[in-house]
Image: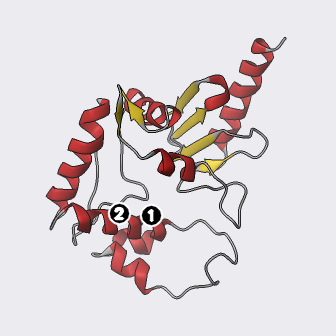
Amino acid sequence: MSALVSSRDAACYAAAQELTWDPGERFEYNSGTSTLLARIVGDAAGEDAGDMRGFMQDELFDVIGMEPVDTQFDDAGTWMGAFSADTTARGYAKFGLLHLRGGEWDGVQVLPKEWVEFVRTPSPTSPEYGGHWWLDPSRPGMFHAIGIRGNVITVDPANDLVIVQLGTVPGSLPLEHFEAIMDTFESVDNP
């Protein structure tokens, strides 16, 4: 990922990589796909990083009251969507709640319901990954946004619950903490 991040045009870098497998053949997480999606949305939003930032602010952050949100853009004006949306625990919780509520916020459909369903549906090649969200096959219906520094947003529709963990330790440790939280929550809920 360091070559992607240090590139002046991350989407161009990602698009130039040769496919290792044919689409749908095998799953392997790749930050480049999030970067390419960010470029597509950015191109639709306008001509530069300011247009994309304004789009995110007007259509998402302001609507759900998610502030402050620190976003980074490469030199080509592409939002570094694979890792760049730093905010507070409350901001992440609002983003999780938006997904818990099927993309609706105060009676406004902010995200299409179909998108929210897509992000929590297993991909054809991995039961543990949906559309840019991680899934937990041992806890059906639950999904997680996992950040590179150990930040995790967990959405649990069955319990009408959003859990946010802020961290600085990447890897499996944040999910181990989450499993302990859920085990405790479930044991209290079902003695």
Q: Can you say whether 105 is above or below 1 in the image?
A: above
Q: Can you say whether 165 is above or below 173 in the image?
A: above
Q: Quadrant of residue 26?
A: bottom right
Instruction: Say which residue appears at 54% left-offset and 68% top-offset.
Output: 30
Bin the neighbour count of mark 1 within 10 Å (Cα to Cα): few under 14, some 14-19, many 20 and up. many
Residue at numbered disc 2: 38
Query: Quadrant of the image for the C terminus?
Result: top right
Mark 2 touching mark 1, by CB under 8 A?
yes
Residue reaching furthest right?
A: 191
Bin the neighbour count of mark 2 within 10 Å (Cα to Cα): few under 14, some 14-19, many 20 and up. some
Quick one: 59 or 19, which is closer to the camera?
A: 59
Quick one: 30 or 171, which is closer to the camera?
A: 30
Q: Amino acid at mark 1?
A: Ser
Is residue 95 found left or right of 74 in the rendered image? right
Instruction: Say which residue appears at 49% left-offset and 37% top-offset.
Output: 102
Identify the mark at residue 34; answer none if there is no mark: 1
Residue 57 place in picture, x, y as percent: 22, 43
